[in-house]
Amino acid sequence: MNLVTVLLYAFAGLAVVSALGVLLFRNVLYAAFALLLTFLGVAGLYVLAGADLLAVVQIVIYVGGVLVLLIFGIMLTGRGAGTGPVSGTHNRLVALLAAGGAFTLFVLLIFRLNAPALGWVREAEAAGRTVTGSTLADIGMNLMTTSVLPFEVAGLLLLVALIGAAYIAGKR
């Protein structure tokens, strides 16, 4: 077993175990931190798959944006230590059967998929259109040269939204 295989199992295990933590933790703040580990595990899987851009987007957008906003909202509302929302119905058996059926279906589809036999995969390999190296440097150069104005405008809008949220939270 080589290092890539060990890392694959480690990142997959981290993603699955922390996703279970998101589902099972009663404290919302603990669930948010488990979601952080889930996002990082998925980003590690993207790196191992050769999708550098997706890994960076996963970390920047989900960890840096969505998760920080989620934790900020939990801390502002003070709902972190509660027991969470309570539903009047308890259909755990139906939910377990539905989740187990979906999981079984996905596993069967993965094992029955013959990716090299797909037509579009063979055409891309024959035409040499497969990406063998990292495209992150090219995308970064494009983002910081030709697309710098929209990038800076988006950053400025996020900064204004953050200042506005801090101002609204401080008025209480």
Image (cartoon, rainbow, N blue to C red):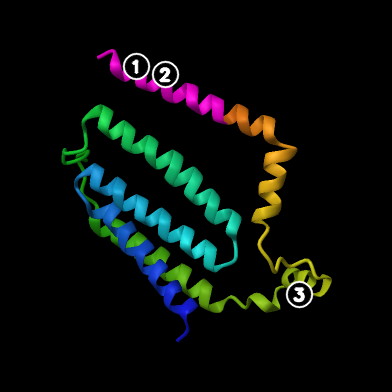
Q: CA distance from mark 2 to mark 1?
A: 6 Å
Tag 3, which secondary structure?
helix
**Circles 2, 1 touching at the beta carbon (< 8 Å):** yes
Residue 167 among magenta residues: yes
Q: What is the number of callouts on the image? A: 3
Classify residue 165 as left or right of residue 121: left
Q: Which mark is residue 168?
A: 1
Rendered position, 117 above or below 155: below
Q: Residue at x 53, y 56 (%)?
A: 55
**Which residue in the protein does label 2 denote?**
164
Residue type (three-letter) at the residue carrying disc 3: Arg
| Residue 99 % position (x, y) | 35, 61
Q: Nearer the viewer, mark 3 or mark 1?
A: 1
Considering every residue shown, the one lying at the far bottom of the view is 1
**CA distance for labels 2 and 3:** 52 Å
Q: Which residue is mark 3?
A: 122
Q: Position of residue 67 (x, y in %)?
A: 39, 42
Depth order, front residue of 42/119: 42
The spot of residue 5 in percent (x, y) is: 47, 79
Residue at x 63% of width, y 34% of height: 151
Residue 113 numbered tag: none
Viewer-proximal residue among 85 and 98: 85
Quarter occupied by the C terminus: top left
The magenta-colored residue range is 155-172
- Using the rendered view, name the quadrant where residue 87 is placed: top left
Provide the major secondary structure of the magenta segment: helix
